[in-house]
Amino acid sequence: MTVILNPDAGTVSKADEISAKITEAFGEAGVHPEIARVDENHDIVTIAKQAAAGTHETIVAGGGDGTISAVAAELAGGGKTLGVLPLGTLNHFAKDLKIPLDLADAVKTITTGRTISVDLAEVNGRIFVNNSSLGIYPVIVSSREKQQQQLARGKWPAFLWATLHALRRFPFLELRITVEGERLARRTAFLFVGNNEYEIAGLNLGGRTCLDAGKLGLYLTRRTGRIGLFRLALRALFGRVKQARDFDAFCVEEALIESHKTRLLVATDGEVRRMNAPLHYKTRPGALRVRVPQSQAR
């Protein structure tokens, strides 16, 4: 078994300490994994590629959703199985699969749980496990990263500053969206594409009930400004967002996003990069094998 550990993950403070805890937890189960750390000389993609080509059948990703996404991309469509040690800040993928956030319990899931197949999604060949977005969110993340790097601000203070800055500028996108043979023109502040459908109202807001329906959830606003976004947020909390006339939601297998811009700022599982337009989103049903608790319902 190979454990790919990202020391930059949200809850990882000391790499040596967490490595020792991981080794101890697996050791109690009679497993002695190889631990490969991500650092300035060993990037996660290279490590994941090597692990995917190696002899170990289970490859464990220790980190946040970005780490899990990078490892999953290299395992997609292969015979190897992903194990998850949720060491990030939000851990959406683990939560949606009911994988425990406690380290010892997550290790137990990997060693005694069961293997299921879940969907992945991709945009222009780039795989993601959770979601991808255009518009205000990637602008916020890009600005936050600059604040952290240039001004040495903490993650959350930088995020707050970046959010306020983005709301002041409030960039709109002019998009042409093709879904199920229909072509729509939209001016929007954001477009969100999920790997399967997301709950957009109620107590499970932002969660997914399944990751194996072979669908994309696509959500966007229509010409909605700052006040309109706040109004949508309130509607979501009270379970009425689908009634909003300035909000679109689709459940599809693929979508084509066109723009007058040749390159667009795109977030995939929290990682931001510029991508060439048009953007072709599609689902990859059952492309990833992953360990989950024995008690998790199918």
Image (cartoon, rainbow, N blue to C red):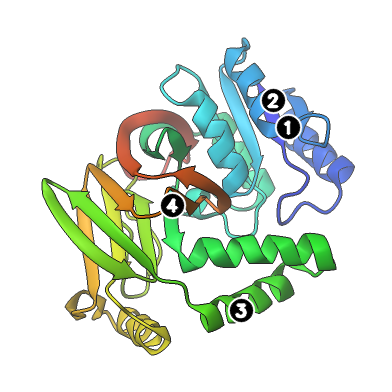
The residue that label 1 is drawn on is 43
| Type of amino acid at the residue the image marks with label 2 | Ile
Question: First in sequence: mark 3 or mark 2?
Answer: 2
Q: Position of residue 189 (x, y in %)?
A: 39, 71
Q: Does 70 sit left or right of 183 as displayed?
A: right
Instruction: Mark 1 or mark 4: name the one nearer the start of the chain.
Output: 1
Q: Where the N terminus falls, by quadrant?
A: top right
Return the mark for residue 165: 3
- Residue closest to the eye, 270 or 91: 270
Question: Where is residue 84, by image quadrant?
Answer: top right
**Residue sitting at 63 percent across and 36 percent down?**
61
Vertical arrangement, residue 174 with respect to residue 224, above or below: above
Q: Earlier in the sequence, mark 1 or mark 3?
A: 1
Q: Is residue 85 visible?
A: no
SS assignment at label 4: strand
What residue is rendered at 43% in x and 57% in y? 133
Of pointers 2 and 4, the one earlier in the residue sequence: 2
How far apart marks 3 and 2 lie (CA) works out to 36 Å
Spatial CA span between label 4 and label 3: 21 Å
Instruction: Assign a secondary structure to mark 2.
Output: helix
Return the residue nearer the eye: 27 or 79: 79
